[in-house]
Image (cartoon, rainbow, N blue to C red):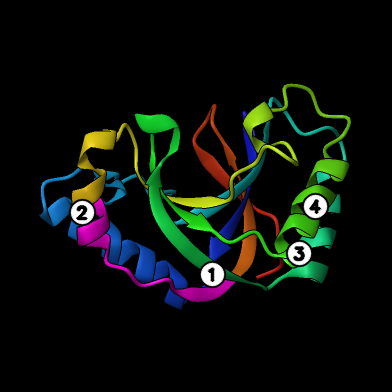
């Protein structure tokens, strides 16, 4: 599987990691416990089985022209009641247009994950995996009520087969 992800600017990244740390300190599930070098706050736009030829270049051109995009984080929720704990991202017109453009570039790819499709996609930054809805009230208290604003300023692709990253923006 190959993903297309936006990564947070340093300030927004630090805000999310601070919540990861507070969740872990409170004894709750948290992505702070994932020590793999690829683990960092990110916003997944799409996931497919493989990239067709030329897609990485086209995505890089798209992101180099479109980023950074300003985002505002919203509520902390559990998706589907018993799944990831996430910080919702308000879907601005710039973000949804970029998301749709990524899907256009990936139109010929096989194995699209339907939960990322335009009209279905719930933009979010993950805080914890396998989170129980019963712990949501405590997680919200630990996360705090702030709604940070910052940029997503780079893009990458994660290869789930070999657990490697490919930059999709010029450094």
x then y, percent, for residue 25: 12, 56
Q: Which residue is mark 4?
A: 59
Q: Residue furthest top?
A: 111
Q: Is residue 102 left or right of residue 143?
A: right
- How dense is the environment of label 3, judged by Cα within 10 Å: few (below 14), some, or many (20 and up)? few
Q: Quadrant of the C terminus?
A: bottom right
Which mark identifies residue 8?
A: none
Range of the magenta residues? 139-151
The residue nearer to you, when weighing 68 against 143, is 143
- Dot 4 falls on a residue whose secondary structure is helix
Q: Which residue is mark 2?
A: 23
Asked whether disc 2 touches disc 4, contact meaning CB atoms under 8 Å apart, the reply is no
Say which label, 1 or 3, has the lower sequence index. Answer: 1
Q: Which residue is mark 1?
A: 72
- Dot 2 falls on a residue whose secondary structure is helix
Say which label, 1 or 2, has the lower sequence index. Answer: 2
- Dot 3 falls on a residue whose secondary structure is helix
- How dense is the environment of label 4, judged by Cα within 10 Å: few (below 14), some, or many (20 and up)? many
Q: Which residue is mark 3?
A: 93
Q: Quadrant of the N terminus?
A: top right
The residue nearer to you, when weighing 165 against 132, is 132
Q: Is residue 63 magenta?
A: no
Please report the residue visible at 29 percent of the width from the left and 35 percent of the height from the top.
133
Look at discs 1 and 4 and give the one toward the viewer.
Answer: 1
Look at discs 2 and 3 and give the one toward the viewer.
Answer: 3
Tell me if residue 160 can be seen. yes
């Amino acid at each position: 599987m190959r993903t297309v992800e936006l990564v947070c600017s340093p300030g927004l990244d630090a805000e999310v990691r601070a919540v990861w740390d507070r969740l872990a300190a409170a004894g709750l599930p948290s992505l702070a416990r994932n020590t793999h070098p690829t683990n960092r706050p990110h916003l997944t736009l799409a996931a497919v089985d493989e990239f067709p030829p030329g897609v990485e270049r086209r995505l890089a051109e798209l992101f180099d022209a479109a980023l950074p995009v300003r985002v505002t984080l919203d509520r902390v929720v559990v998706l589907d009641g018993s799944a990831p704990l996430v910080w919702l991202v308000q879907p601005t017109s710039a973000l949804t247009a970029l998301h749709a453009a990524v899907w256009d570039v990936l139109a010929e790819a096989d194995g699209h994950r339907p939960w990322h499709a335009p009209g279905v996609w719930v933009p979010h930054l993950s805080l914890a995996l396998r989170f129980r809805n019963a712990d949501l009230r405590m997680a919200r208290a630990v996360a705090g009520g702030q709604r940070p604003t910052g940029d997503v300023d780079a893009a990458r692709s994660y290869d789930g087969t070999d657990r490697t990253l490919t930059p999709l923006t010029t450094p």
